[in-house]
Amino acid sequence: MIDRIVENGFATHDEGEEAKAQPLGVLARTYGPKIHASEYFAEEVRRKIIDDFGEDKLYGGGLSVRTTLDPRMQAIARKALVKGLTDYDRTHAGWRGVEKTIDPAGDWGKTLAGVPVWSDIEPWKLAVVLEVSNDQAKVGIRPGRDKEGKLVAERETGIIPAAEVKWTRKTVTQALKPGDVVYVAPLEPKTDKDGNPAPEETVAGKWSLQQVPKVSGAITAMDPHTGRVLAIIGGFSFHQSQFDRATQALRQPGSSFKPIIYLTAIDNGYTPSSIIVDGQICVSQGRGMPPWCPKNYSGGGAGPSTLRYGIEKSRNLMTVRLSRDIGMPVIAEYARRFGVYDNLMPALSMSLGAGETTLLRMVNAYGMIANGGKKVEATFIDRIQDRYGRTVWRHDKRDCSGCDAREWDRQAEPELVDVREQVVDPISAFQMVGIMEGVVQHGTARRLTALNRPLAGKTGTTNDYKDAWFIGYTPDLVVGAYVGYDQPKPMGRSATGGGLAAPIVKDFLEEALKDVPPVPFRAPPGAMLVRVNHKTGLPARRGDSGVIMEAFKPGHVPDGAVIVEGEAPEGGEQQGEAFPEYPDNAQAGGPPQGFPPPQQYRAPPPGQSGFQGPPSNDRALTSGTGGLY
């Protein structure tokens, strides 16, 4: 190898001889979360290159690959997912016991070093219990290795305070005994109300007791304008399981699919203020079968309600009724456009997210809503060059007119032409963004309001609480997470998208956007911004409480509305922000108080909305086993 380097002129003869005279050494592989947090990402890159170029080119072609990975976001994503999975596991699964037991006598470090451990779960460490008391457990930390791969001589010890064992619902002496091998993590200092470490808090040498969760999940972050995947974590540990749950796991998205339904309606004549009945609906499934009667998560119905309310409160009955009006074939086409499903079965239950898809596909679809309806395709690679520096593949397909000019001769400035396909009206996409902001402001993802920045999203929870989803986005970043067992089974009634997946996304965004100033969502040309009553969707009147800004298309603005054309919402008036709770159940016999009379809240007829209308006798379109929320 050295001779070849000299022959090719990269080193002199003397430099080569000096290098060959050096003794051979072994360099231990570096371990750490910033390196190994990217293994799921690297595997996706490897698969892509093999699919497009083959194994020979990958391993012998001298390719130079520039990926889309953001190492900082990748590390943050792993931390957020691990916290979410372990928090659920502690609360719902309880303590399952120690990893194994060894003899702590003699050189426990050497014995512990022989216990296999996953290298990609930093900052977790493997430890052996040395002593136990009512107040704490003394543990020995698995020793590391030096640059030559030899076990270090120093032995590190620490303590697990009783408070860090409390989650097991056992005392220290009940949960642990000398010789037990367990996972521990450095105890993080408590913070004050401003997020600063409390000065009196001393955590050096203190560890928390950990347990590898049985539940799994994934998280993905993407640039909505380009499709560049910035971070992806496909499970708790790549060394535990190389199955990437973000790209390979087919899961039911539940209510996180509903925005596609409502966007289809908005793109075909509905408005955020259109009224849909939130009440019982039953669908025939054919001769000899009972009717399918979906229910809302909270039961009951709120009566005639705005389309916005249907998304904010994730109302199943409104969604099914709307889907029947639009027609499932139309919805299937929009699902294909947004890349959620290639060929959605036209059954009404599919409107509640009963079909299976991947987290990456859902994140990509939400990215198209966030970017104004432009088609993007998720990518892990920016460009690939061969051994000679020639670009053989690139994700960015834009042409730059004039970029190759060698000198300036008063010609026009170089221009990058946007070649992305427009899959939906940009105003429709902006209206959907505004509605989904309401999900965060006062809907099923209210806990994310603590981030104090423009943010939209949607939760999803499937039948029997088998999957919990949340996908959220800012104008320039979309992040999605789901949690569920690899072999789907109920996670418990509290395992909802808002309670389980949303906190994972919140933790990620809080850290990833720490130094990024808030940016409002950008309204497209032609969008009409109107102040409306949050409950009725009608133009706001003097003295109305809970007034919000709502976007309308030209020609769809309610009569009597004052148009704030081309202006962004001012101050705290984000779309859908700051209005009180809707009623959970409407009183029988009429719409909730404040709604207009029935003749004013009918949905647009098929002829005006562009809908073909639902086939009346096609059982394939009205059968299914939904009931998701």
Image: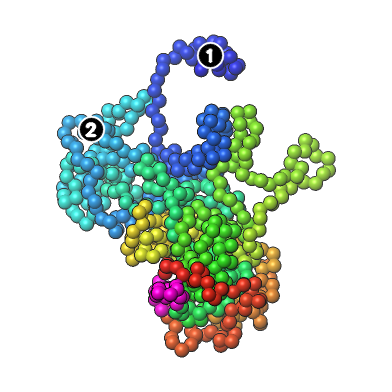
Residue shown at 45% from the left, 11% from the top:
21
Quadrant, the C terminus: bottom left
- Circles 2 and 1: CB distance less than 8 Å? no
Label 1 crowd (10 A; few <14 / some 14-19 / many >=20): some
**Residue 108 horizontal/vertical position (percent):** 21, 33
Mark with earlier residue (2, 1)? 1
Residue shown at 76% from the left, 42% from the top:
402
Principal SS element in the magenta part?
loop
Residue shown at 48% from the left, 84% from the top:
592
Report whether 22 appears left or right of 430.
Answer: left
Q: Amino acid at mark 1?
A: Asp
Secondary element at image label 2: helix
Q: Is residue 83 magenta?
A: no
Determine which quarter of the picture holds residue 119. top left
Q: Which residue is mark 2?
A: 111
Numbered badge on residue 3: 1
Residue 298 in view here = yes
**Residue 525 horizontal/vertical position (percent):** 69, 64
Report whether 107 appears left or right of 443.
Answer: left
Report the residue that reaches farthest toward the front: 287
Label 2 crowd (10 A; few <14 / some 14-19 / many >=20): some
Identify the magenta region: 282-301
Residue 121 in view here = no
Q: Residue 593, relative to residue 92: is it above or below?
A: below
Numbered badge on residue 206: none
Q: Amino acid at mark 2?
A: Thr
